[in-house]
Amino acid sequence: MIQPGQTYRSLSNRHHPADGPIRIRITNAPIGATDIDGMRKVQVATITSDGREIRPRWMRADKLHTTATTRDGAPRRTGYVQEDT
């Protein structure tokens, strides 16, 4: 269940190795109604290396995952996976 305050890291390999994956934090719970495209949205912000929240934006909730693997066991290559807290 997606909750405000949760952090996620990017599964993409498009970052510089020294920077590490992009991290985001949920700032607003999912809106109940679907949007024009039929998807639920959550409000997120990018987390900098010193912990600041920058670049607030809305993101589709289906891009957020609880595990880094699909139900078939294959590694995910896109989206964001929840970090252990």
Image (cartoon, grey):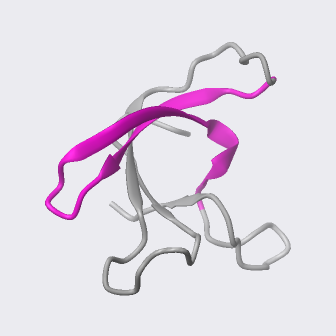
Picture layout, residue 38 above or below residue 10 = above
Picture layout, residue 21 above or below residue 27 = below
How many circles with numbers are drawn on the protein?
0
Name the outermost residue toward the right. Answer: 72
Image coordinates of residue 60 in percent, x first then y, are: 64, 36
Image quadrant holding the N terminus, namely top right
The residue located at (43%, 38%) in the rendering is 44
Name the outermost residue toward the left. Answer: 50
- Residue 53: quadrant of the picture: top left
The residue located at (40%, 86%) in the rendering is 17
Please state if 72 lies on the left or on the right of 46 as rendered: right
Image coordinates of residue 6 in percent, x first then y, are: 38, 46
**Does residue 9 show up magenta in the picture?**
no
Judging depth in this view, the residue of 14 and 51 nearest the camera is: 14
Judging depth in this view, the residue of 84 and 11 nearest the camera is: 11
Please state if 16 lies on the left or on the right of 47 as rendered: right
Q: Which residues are magenta?
A: 38-66
Image coordinates of residue 62 in percent, x first then y, are: 69, 43
Picture layout, residue 77 above or below residue 52 = below
